[in-house]
Amino acid sequence: MKKIDPSKVYTELRDRVSPISPILGRKYTVTHSDETAELFVTIGRHYADDKIGPTRDEVLLAYESTETGMMLLGEVLIVGDEITGNAKMRSEIFKREMPIALQAIRYGDRRLFQTKPDLDELPILIWFRSSEPEYNKLYDFGTMSEYR
C-alpha cells in the first residue's frame, strides 16, 4: 500500500467538533489537490459541502450506530447526479486511492484514535454510488488499524 506524506495532510475541525469528541455523528470530508498531492481532511458534524468540487472526487465518511454496532460508513460518487463519464475508470481510481484517503483520515484525526483506540477496530464500509448498476456497490475496506 502506498503511504501518505504526513506533511501534505491538512486537517480542519469545524461545527464545534474537538479533537476527541463527538464520535457518533462525526463526519469526514476528504479532498485532494492533483497538482500538489495535498490531502484535506475536514472533520465536522456536517459534510464540508464548500470543499466539494465539480469533479466530485471527494470521500465522505461518518461514524454511525447500526444494529450490529458502530461503524464508519461512507460514500463516493461514481456516476450519477451531475457526474457523467467512465464509471469503470472512476470506480477503479476510487478503489486504488481509497487507502490514501483512509490513511489521511487516520493521520488527520490521530488524537481521536489515540484517545479511543477501539475506533481502530470499527468496520469501514463505503458505498460506490452509481446510476450504472454494475458499479453501484458496497465495499468493505477493513478497519482503520490497517491505515495507521
Image (cartoon, grey):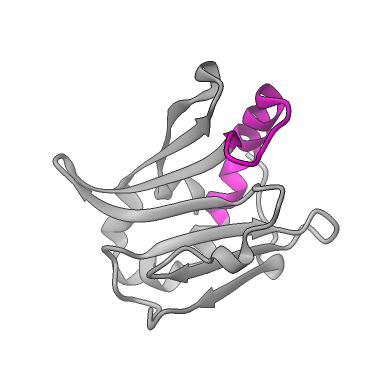
Residue at the far top: name it: 134
Residue at the far left: name it: 67
Q: Residue at x 42, y 67 (%)?
A: 46
Q: Out of 4 and 96, give the one closest to the viewer.
A: 96
Q: Quadrant of the N terminus?
A: top right
In the image, is residue 102 part of the stretch drawn in magenta?
Answer: yes
Q: Residue at x 43, y 46 (%)?
A: 74
Above-or-below relation of 2 to 116 = above
Tell me the magenta residue range.
78-103
User: What type of secondary structure mainly makes up the magenta span?
Assistant: helix
Image spot of residue 34 (x, y percent): 80, 53
Quarter of the rendering containing residue 130: top right
Q: Residue at x 65, y 65 (%)?
A: 6
Quarter of the rendering containing residue 21: bottom left
Q: Out of 86 and 65, give the one closest to the viewer.
A: 86
Q: Residue at x 14, y 41 (%)?
A: 67
Image spot of residue 133 (x, y percent): 50, 18
In the image, is residue 94 part of the stretch drawn in magenta?
Answer: yes
Image spot of residue 11 (x, y percent): 57, 73
Above-or-below relation of 112 to 82 = below
Q: Out of 8 and 51, give the one closest to the viewer.
A: 51
Quarter of the rendering containing residue 91: top right
Q: Out of 11 and 46, give the one closest to the viewer.
A: 46
Above-or-below relation of 74 to 92 = below
Image spot of residue 48 (x, y percent): 53, 66
Residue at the far front: name it: 82
Above-or-below relation of 104 to 141 = below
